[in-house]
Structures are given as structure tokens and as C-alpha cells.
Image (cartoon, rainbow, N blue to C red):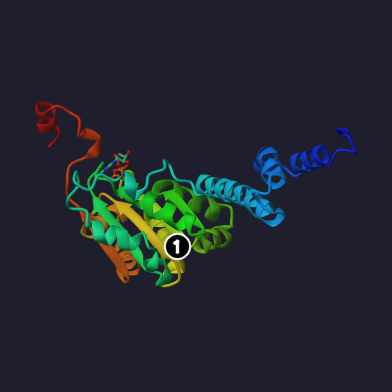
Amino acid sequence: MRTVDESSPYLRAQANLSELKLDEMAAAMPDYVRLVAGGERDFAQAVAEMTQAEVAARRERIMRQRIRSSGFPYIKTLADFDWSFQPSVPRAKLEELATLRFMDAAENVLLVGSPGVGKTHLAIAIGIEAVKAGREVRFCDCSRLVEDLKDASSRGILKNRLKYYAHSKLLIIDELGYLDIDEHGADLVFQLVSTRYEQRSTIITTNVGIGGWANVFGDEVAASAIADRVCHHCSLIKITGRSYRLKDLPADRKRETD
Ligand code: ADP
Ligand code: MG
């Protein structure tokens, strides 16, 4: 343990702030000693301002930690979205979703479109708004989610795992349709959407319109049961533009990808 000069309140205060890991306060202290001595702040004002900086830094740390633990593959916000590049995206609707009222009503969001049009970006942007509002968010790649549920099922802990996913205030299932899902997987997805139905919001991004889900799940009945739960209270957003990933390709290369 560090020894401090017990006779110096200033050094004692600094040592205490450092032990309490109140680094912002420790850094601001010399300024506030001067401001209080000069009569520019009274004691309460000084404490209020010094703790304010500490509170802001702590909130920021917690937010970063929550964003990290939500599982987003990258961080993007609505402010990063180039609306003019993708005019088929209903901006007002996305801004309405960002208010999170849909979550209070346990409604879902389905983002449909070909690769690169911004589905994952928009889902993440709404997810980040939810984290900022203090809600628990889980972002999952669809095929990994199905693998995870299968694994839980084979280990006899499916109920627990479904509870874990049911608990998230917002679940984002990304890239449904990129890989086919077998009968067992379809049943697990059905159980998952059923546990969340009318209780909690789910955002799904997919390159396959609902009409094609029978192919994804390999079964018409399972696909329509899943689509039924997802779409009952749902904002459907179809994006029909070009891939943002290819936007900088020269015009002759672009034609090759059309
Ligand atoms: P997908 O529709 O395949 O999920 P993504 O959302 O992952 O596409 O977008 C691919 C990349 O392009 C991401 O880095 C994303 O941030 C970016 N992007 C897509 N659309 C836009 C846009 N309109 N404005 C800004 N960046 C975009
Ligand atoms: Mg995507």
C-alpha cells in the first residue's frame, strides 16, 4: 500500500480518489482547489461539477461495455446511413423505429433485400438506440443461432437456452436465408419466435422474401408457422436498391454484377 503524507489533505484526497478509481475527479481536483480558493465556486458547486464528469465517464464506459456484449458485428448508426444512396429505404419509418415505440408494443421488424443494401447496418443502428435506452439487446447471426439451439437441444438444455433468448428485450436475427435450415432447425426457430411472440420484439434481416421461406426451412408448414408469428405485428421494410459494397466499382464493372 502506498503511504501518504497524512498531514496533507490534498495528497490524502488524491490518494483516496485514485484508490476509488475516480480518475476524472482526481484530474480535475487541482483546478477546483484553485477555483474554490479564488471564490469562483462554492464547495457544493465544486463537488457537483467534479462528480458530474465522473458520472458522465462512467455512463460512457457502461454503454461501451453493453454495446460490446450485445454481439454487434460492427457499430453503425442511422447518422452513418447514406439515405440518398438507398432511396427505397423509408427514412421516416426508420426514424420512427429508432424511437423504440415498436418495442413497447412488442412489434417486430423484417428487413428484406439483396446483399449489401444496408439491412444489417439498419438493424444494428436500431439495436444501438435500444442499448442506449438501457434495454438488453442480443444480436445473432441466424445460422449460428440455429447451431447454438441445436447444441443446447442435444445437451438437454434447450429450455434454458430458449429462456436466455426469450429474455432479451430486443433480439436481432441477422441473415436468415443465407443458409438453408433443416427440419430440426426450423422447429427450434419456431419455438424461439413463439416464446417471443407478442412479448418481446425481434428484428430479422433476410435476403429472401416471405414467399421464399418454404425453401429456406425446407417445409411449407413450418415456414408459414414461423412467418405467421413474425409478421403478425410487424414493420416490413423492403430495400430494392444496389449494394453499397459495390458503389465505388467503375460503371463497366457494375454492369457485370447487375
Ligand atoms: P446487408 O444488406 O447485406 O446486410 P450491410 O448492412 O452489411 O448489408 O451493408 C454492407 C456495408 O455497407 C456495411 O458496412 C454498411 O455499413 C454499408 N452500407 C450499406 N448501405 C449503406 C448506406 N446507405 N449508407 C452508408 N453505408 C451503407
Ligand atoms: Mg447483412
Assign a secondary structure to mark 1: helix
Depth check: 243 or 128 in front? 128
Please state the horizontal and vertical placement of residue 60, each as a whole percent of the image. 55, 47
- Dividing the image into 4 quarters, which one contains the N terminus? top right
Q: Give the number of marks.
A: 1
Is 254 drawn above or below residue 171 in the view shown? above
Is 218 on the left or on the right of 145, as rendered?
Answer: left
Please tell me which residue is depicted at 38% across the width and 68% down the height of the picture.
101
Direction front: furthest residue: 38
Please tell me which residue is depicted at 41% across the width and 66% down the height of the picture.
103
Quadrant in the rendering for residue 37: top right
Per the image, the residue denoted by label 1 is 192
Is 27 drawn above or below residue 222 in the view shown? above
Please state the horizontal and vertical placement of residue 212, each as a whole percent of the image. 22, 56
Mark 1 sits near ligand 2, with its Cβ under 8 Å away: no
Please tell me which residue is depicted at 13% across the width and 31% down the height of the picture.
254
Please state the horizontal and vertical placement of residue 190, each as a whole percent of the image. 40, 63
Q: Amino acid at mark 1?
A: Leu
Quadrant in the rendering for residue 236: bottom left
- Can you see residue 190? no
Is 39 drawn above or below residue 102 in the view shown? above
Please state the horizontal and vertical placement of residue 227, each as a whole percent of the image. 30, 64
Depth check: 17 or 247 in front? 17
- Can you see residue 7? yes
Neighbours of disc 1 within 10 Å: few (<14), some (14-19), many (20+): some
- Indicate which quadrant contains ligand 2: top left
Is 29 on the left or on the right of 138, as rendered?
Answer: right
Please tell me which residue is depicted at 64% across the width and 42% down the height of the picture.
24
